[in-house]
Image (cartoon, rainbow, N blue to C red):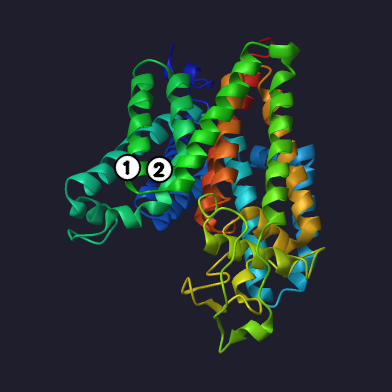
Amino acid sequence: MSVASHEGIVPNAPRRHALTLASAIFVGIGIPLLASSPTVTGIALALGLILLLAAPGRLQLVADLAHGARTPLGLATALTFILWLPGVVESPDFGRSIGIWGRMIGFVLVAALIHHFLSRGALNSCLRALIVASLVCALIALLGLYVASPIYGLFRGKGWVEVNAAQILKYYGSALACLTPVVLWAAFRLGGRWRVAGLVYLPAAVVLIFAVDSLAGLSGLVAGLVVGAVVGICQCWHVLRGHAAALFLGLLALLLIAAVAWIFSYLPPTPGAEQIADGIYHGPVDTELPVSLIDAHRQYIWGFAFDKGLEAPFFGHGIDVSNHLPGASVLIEKFNQTFIPSHPHSWLLEIFLETGAVGLVILLVALAFLLRLWLRIGRTSPGTAACGIAVFVAFWSSSMLNFSIWAAWWQGVFLVLSAIVLAAASRDAVTSPAR
């Protein structure tokens, strides 16, 4: 089989254009290059987008975007942005909130463009580039951690200097939680020697996550692989006439809701103004939840965020303003940390605090439509659906413990990887409609 037919394109067709191939490669290497820095990732993805728009077929991409906007997922996404606007308008930092709101719309559009672009060709080139870049970045990171840190310093753009590679790479642990399932899936999808590359990458990624001490990355990877595997098995074996995967995810959602409700009911209350002097809380630090389960400072962060969210329960205080709200900068003496150091350290509370219950509910509806789409894909492509759900679970579970949900590079991890896997699902639907 020729490369052209393997990619689903014909010789001399527009998709064979050099711009198409280059764009697919830049998209593929984008997320792995987070090992260097988010800036390098941004440059790679920007180049991929520019080349994508310069390649033949732009009008078709616009038509695909318009069609995607009319799907249930597209409409739910649009409604999410609309219902976030009231909180943005009332934000104490309107410029900051509207900027991030607009940036997110741009990110979603870019991810949609990548999805439709790869759905029409060059997908395998993108996957090969992703696997190779992931392996190279993992190798450089491991050499910097265990052989000579200047190796990583050079890769980071700092020159041949000693660096604390483990500390700098800590954020990459969470990215690996989402990237690893995609590398494994891509390797087995391509087959042959690529499978070996995927099997080599898995232990390398696990070692990296432990080396940088990323609890969020480890929990996300384990959750993603386990849930993805269960869903894949259920759909591949057609358990309970194909309904087992949906039942499993529904039960899991109910358990998570119960767990979150239990945790929130025991969060410590925000200290009153009489307990704060000169911007410092000197009072006792009492927790009802075991600190072995959730550390004391995080409990106070979550308690403060939940209480602040109740002050604007419908549409929130505005996107990305949690650490600028009154009382957020109060120092807790026993931790030598503020009530919200930079963000609430939980996407659920951050969305509630900043977009309100309305914003949180509509986001959950949009995410439910995304899961519904993956389950539908699983009827014909169980492996692809399992990978998509693994990325979904890894991202949202890690986000309960790590970065702000508004962090540009972190959103990019989820959106770009999801777009790539969804593109494969679209190609499967075209090439194997009767499967």
Q: Report the front residue among 41 and 22.
A: 41
Q: Quadrant of residue 200?
A: top left
Query: In terms of secondary structure, where does tag 1 sit?
Result: helix
Amino acid type of disc 2? Pro
Q: Is residue 56 visible?
A: no
Where does residue 324 sit, x and y in percent of width and height? 61, 76
Q: Report the residue at 54% width, 39% height from top.
A: 394
Badge 2: residue crowd in 10 Å (few <14, some 14–19, many ≥20): many
Numbered circle sitting on residue 137: 1
Q: Is residue 325 visible?
A: yes
- On screen, residue 375 versus residue 391, left or right, reads right
Q: Report the residue at 34% width, 18% height from top.
A: 193
Q: Are marks 2 and 1 in contact (CB under 8 Å)?
A: yes
Where does residue 196 sit, x and y in percent of width and height? 34, 20
Q: Quadrant of the N terminus?
A: top left
User: Which mark sits nearer the N-terminus, 2 or 1?
Assistant: 2
Badge 1: residue crowd in 10 Å (few <14, some 14–19, many ≥20): many
Check disc 2 and report the residue beneath it: 32
Q: Quadrant of residue 136?
A: top left
Q: Quadrant of residue 115?
A: top right
Numbered circle sitting on residue 74: none
